Image (cartoon, coloured by chain):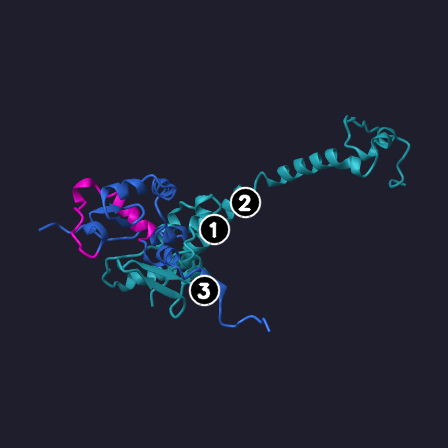
């Protein structure tokens, strides 16, 4: 009843799912779906296929180093059972999972930080380059409202003393 | 007349020749070759004598996992483009392993427990 990870896409393989290939040097390759198995048989590199976790880790799209990763690991040495420790661990698991999810969301937000500014710059550049397809250049000189404003004018607001309709 | 025979499959015919089947099924995996190449020279055992292999199994290309009949043929193989491509590939990053998959999935490094005292 051990949960393994797929060799190709790093998904969790639950019992009764997937397929396993044992090479003649006794190295085991586990696959969660026939999609991963087929990609393995085609000798594809998981680090170059964009939908795998290995690709996302190499290209910095997922969080890679965090202390919450240390709680889930393969333990090759059995521990003696301790009831109190087991209860505390079971109590701590949802808390650790919540912390990990929060940190991953923060990582994603940091990665997307400069995206809005980038989109605005791209839109401005596209407008500047492509406005001649909509209006002829001679018309643009007559009607400057279709182009981006070149000069910012400061508008001064004056308080008129005669206009007080609400106070009546 | 002239209808297509339903049993003759072009794909099966195309992939059933010797080179394709050897490439797909018989070659050593990249990680095995990589491990052999990175093994220090003291641990590399001399090639065992095998009468079933060409050249008694003494003229071997580790990158391409091929045996040759004599030194001249093997040295000629070292000049081929496929061999050079293979060398370049083996000098690159280490091949993907299950450990890489586990780490990418969010697991830590394996816990092997305390080191046992050597007797």
Q: Is residue A141 above or below residue A43?
A: above
For residue B12, which quarter of the picture?
Answer: bottom left
Pointers 1 and 3 in contact (CB under 8 A)?
A: no
Tell me the SS state at disc 3.
helix
| Chain in cyan on the image | A
The N terminus of chain A: image quadrant: bottom left
Q: Position of residue B114 (x, y in %)?
A: 20, 51
Q: In this rendering, is residue A158 above or below B119?
A: above
Where's residue B49, x and y in %? 16, 52
How many residues crowd around disc 2 within 10 Å: few (fewer than 14), some, or many (20 or more)? few
Are both tags, 3 and 2, on one chain? Answer: no
First to last magenta residue range? B28-52
Give residue A109's mark.
2
Residues tagged 3 and 2 counted as in contact (Cβ below 8 A): no
Return the residue nearer the eye: A86 or A141: A141
User: Marks 1 and 3: same chain?
Assistant: no
Marks 1 and 2 sit apart, C-alpha to C-alpha, by 24 Å
Residue drawn where x is 37% and y is 50% of the image: B96
Residue B74 located within the stretch drawn in magenta = no
């Amino acid at each position: 009843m051990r949960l393994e990870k797929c060799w190709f896409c790093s998904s969790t393989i639950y019992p009764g799912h997937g397929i396993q290939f044992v090479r003649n040097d006794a190295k085991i390759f586990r696959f969660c779906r026939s999609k991963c198995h087929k990609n393995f048989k085609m000798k594809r590199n998981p680090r170059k296929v964009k939908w795998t976790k290995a690709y996302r880790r190499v290209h910095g799209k997922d969080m890679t180093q965090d202390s919450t990763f240390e709680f889930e690991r393969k333990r090759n040495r059995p521990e003696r059972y301790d009831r109190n420790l087991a209860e505390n661990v079971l109590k701590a698991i949802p808390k650790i999972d919540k912390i990990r999810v929060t940190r991953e969301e923060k990582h994603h937000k940091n990665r997307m930080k400069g995206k809005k500014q980038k989109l605005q710059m791209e839109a401005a550049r596209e407008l500047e380059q492509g406005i001649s397809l909509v209006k002829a250049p001679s018309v643009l000189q007559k009607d400057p409202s279709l182009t981006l404003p070149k000069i910012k004018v400061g508008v001064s607001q004056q308080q008129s003393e005669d206009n007080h309709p609400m106070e009546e | 007349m002239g209808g297509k025979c339903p049993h003759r499959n072009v794909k099966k015919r195309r992939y059933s020749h010797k080179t394709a089947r050897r490439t797909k099924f018989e070659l050593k995996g990249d990680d095995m070759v990589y491990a052999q190449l990175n093994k220090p020279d003291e641990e590399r055992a001399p090639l065992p004598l095998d009468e079933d292999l060409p050249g008694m199994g003494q003229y071997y290309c580790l990158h391409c996992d091929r045996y040759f009949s004599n030194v001249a043929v093997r040295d000629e193989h070292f000049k081929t483009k496929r061999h050079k491509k293979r060398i370049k590939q083996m000098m690159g990053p280490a091949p993907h392993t299950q450990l890489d998959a586990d780490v990418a999935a969010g697991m830590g490094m394996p816990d092997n427990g305390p080191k046992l005292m050597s007797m």
